[in-house]
Image: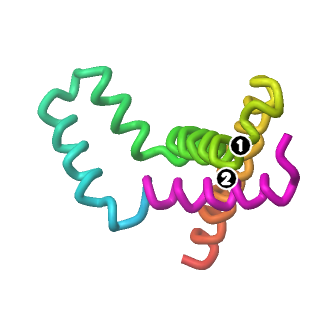
Amino acid sequence: MIDLTTLALLGLAGYRGTQLAVHDTVLDPVRDRVIAWHERRQTSAVRSAVVTLISCVYCMGWWVSGALLATYLLVSGTFDQAPLLTHGVEWFAVAGLAVLLNRLDDVLSRVHG
């Protein structure tokens, strides 16, 4: 099981990765192309799901956090040191922290924005 410091760092990275994927202007051209792709066939469930994924901090945050956790576990050589269920709980913890930070960011931007 990962320690609290690692959990905190992965949660911060998950928050930042989610912001990058959903909000940052550097990925606007990619998001614009996906949205244009969806508009050509708006009744497509797959296209609608992709647009939902790239525009939702909760949806994208889940997958970004999972990818970060898996990368950390594989690169550090610790993936096989705990049961798969433990890594599932870690995924929830990392994603939960990332979402909490996204919510905090949303609240602060409304107060100061």
Q: Residue at x 33, y 66 (%)?
A: 26
Q: Residue at x 26, y 52 (%)?
A: 30
Where residue 31 is drawn, which disc sits there? none
Q: Quadrant of the C terminus?
A: bottom right
Quarter of the image holding residue 25?
Answer: bottom left
Q: Are marks 2 and 1 in contact (CB under 8 Å)?
A: no
Q: Residue 57: x and y, percent?
A: 53, 48
Q: Which residues are magenta?
A: 1-21
Identify the amino acid type marked 1. Gly
Please state if 32 lies on the left or on the right of 78 as rendered.
Answer: left
Q: Which residue is mark 1?
A: 77
Q: Secondary structure at mark 2?
A: helix
Residue at the bottom extreme? 112
Q: Main secondary structure of the magenta part?
A: helix
Q: Residue at x 63, y 73 (%)?
A: 111
Q: Quadrant of the N terminus?
A: top right
Look at the picture and state if 82 lies above or below 74: above
Q: Residue 13: x and y, percent?
A: 62, 59
Q: Residue at x 67, y 61 (%)?
A: 12
Quarter of the image holding residue 90?
Answer: top right
Look at the picture and state if 62 lies above or below 110: above
72 vs 18, nearest the viewer: 72
Q: Which residue is mark 2?
A: 98
Q: Is residue 24 magenta?
A: no
Please state if 19 lies on the left or on the right of 9 as rendered.
Answer: left
Q: Is residue 11 magenta?
A: yes
Q: Secondary structure at mark 1?
A: loop
Please state if 4 lies on the left or on the right of 107 as rendered.
Answer: right
